[in-house]
Image (cartoon, helix red, strand yellow):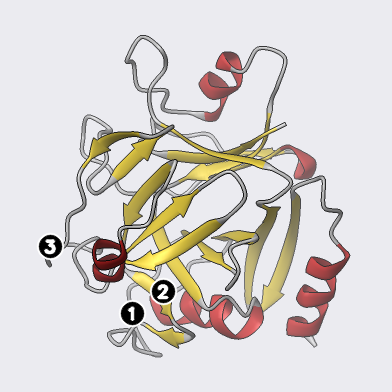
Amino acid sequence: MIRWAVLALIWAAPAAAVTCEDVESAGNRYTVCTVDVVAEDLRLFLRDDDGHILGNFRNIDDTLDDARLGFAMNAGMHHDDRAPVGHFMQNGVQVMRVVPNAGPGNFGLLPNGVLCINEADAQVYETLRFVREAPVCRDATQSGPMLVIDAALHPRFLPDGTSKYIRNGVGTSADGSTAMFVISNDVVNFYEFGVFFRDVLRMPNALYFDGRVSRLHAPSLGRSDPGFRLGPIVGVVE
């Protein structure tokens, strides 16, 4: 029943607005923000025009003049100086190259992936596929691990995994017209989080952004999570 309720919510969502809803599945609570990428202005943010790290939702809003953030969340792992760990592009300018090799931490738990955003589509690519196909991206952010790869869970995820945190990530539809951004409101393991994207939201590809530091800005829910400065941020400008 939860799956069909969520799908009905997606299908009923107005095309000209970001829809954020609280959903419960398998005893865990999530907030799901659905973006019609064709209709909405989905972007990545990192620095202001003077080169300073934006770091939070309020600072982004302050740069938008007569517009505002309709939705935002952290969008990839960062170093202590808030520079992105992996590939990052903003408005066609590459800030950090693709990192294709395995490494420490969740980012290096291959396969990881890249969220590629253009004017009318958004796609999550597994990193080696991204390197091989070299798609054109206006904005891009690399993170990891992948949660869902071609409708299959990441092979390293365990149902009884004991590492549980507040987590956030993104899934994209096969045609790239819809992006679904999710933050857990309870601590979950990778398996639970991946299953939510695969079985409930039916996203064929999904990418993990982060845990512990995960934050959401959803004005329609009266929510804007506080905390220390972030690195890459994804948001919709209205």
Provide the secondary structure element on which disc 3 rests.
Answer: loop
34 displayed left or right of 96: right
Are the residues tagged 3 and 1 within 8 Å (C-beta)? no
Q: Label 2 amino acid?
A: Leu
- Tag in front: 2 or 1: 2
According to the image, label 2 marks what residue?
147
Crowd around label 3: few <14 · some 14–19 · many ≥20 (10 Å): few
User: What crowding class fits label 2: few (fewer than 14 Cα within 10 Å), some (14-19), or many (20 or more)?
Assistant: many
Q: Along the horizontal axis of the image, is 173 left or right of 68?
A: left
Vertical order, 141 against 200 (above or below): above
Q: Position of residue 216 (x, y in %)?
A: 57, 45
Q: Left of 229 or right of it: where is 187?
A: right
**Between marks 3 and 2 in the image, the one whose residue lies nearer the viewer:** 2
User: Which residue is pictured at 22% across the width and 29% down the height?
Assistant: 81
CA gap, disc 3 to disc 2?
17 Å
Residue 60, image x and y in percent? 54, 23
Residue 188 visible to an observer of this rendering? yes
Task: Specify the quadrant of the image occupied by residue 21.
Answer: bottom right
- Mark 1 — residue? 162
Mark 3 highlights which residue? 104
Q: Identify the residue shown where x is 48% and y is 73%.
A: 205
